[in-house]
Image: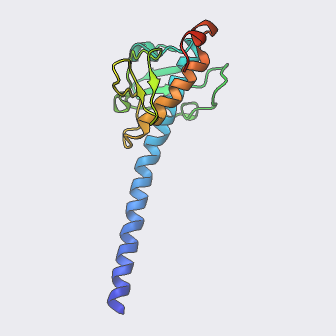
Amino acid sequence: MRSGLIVVGICLAVSIVAGVVLAGRYRGELVQVEDVVTGLIYFLEKNEGRFPQSQEEFEASPFVETGPQGVRILSPEQTKYRKPTHGDKGLWIPSLEPFKINWGAQLDGLTVDEFGNARDTKGDKVRLVRWPSSEPSAKEFTILLLRVAAENRPKAAKEASPP
């Protein structure tokens, strides 16, 4: 009985430590990916549903601040999307590289299949951005960004190519 309680106690302690470590790791990444995706949403809103052609173009946006600490996404004064960002509270993202942003993606030709995957005209899966610790997140973020892009296209473009 005593041995059993010791084993259970050790398992409980290891679980708690693992939970704290994972929560700390994912919390930092989660708020960063939220700001990256929010920044891409702001870009789509300000550019009639067009995705940034390059990291440089994205960073030149008025709501992106760059510095030695990396980039920071700030809320624009006028937006119909989420405010405030974590960047408004001082969060810097050291690098955009881990998010594997698909700079220059042409969103007009993308379709969504029955499984919720965005596909290009060749039928290849397209991912616009991902959370570094969760590859499946790319699918959800891509669908979200496609919806925002469709909402922000000029009326004539919306009629020509349905989302």
Q: Is residue 160 left or right of residue 54?
A: right
Q: Is residue 91 left or right of residue 125?
A: right
On screen, residue 90 above or below 104 = below
Residue 158 in percent (x, y) is at 59, 13
Q: How many marks?
A: 0
Q: Residue at x 41, y 13 (%)?
A: 53
Q: Is residue 163 left or right of residue 98?
A: right
Q: Residue at x 55, y 12 (%)?
A: 47
Does residue 64 appear in the picture of this structure? yes
Quarter of the C terminus within the rendering: top right
Residue 104 in percent (x, y) is at 39, 15
Instruction: Kindly give the residue lying farthest to the front in the view shown.
Output: 114
Residue 50 in percent (x, y) is at 50, 13
Judging from the image, the colouring scheme is rainbow
Does residue 128 appear in the picture of this structure? no
Q: Quadrant of residue 97?
A: top left
Instruction: Kindly give the residue lying farthest to the bottom in the view shown.
Output: 1
Quarter of the N terminus within the rendering: bottom left
Q: In this rendered view, identify the residue nearer to me: 42 or 93.
A: 42
Q: Quadrant of residue 20?
A: bottom left
Q: Is residue 107 left or right of residue 79?
A: left
Q: Residue at x 35, y 23 (%)?
A: 123
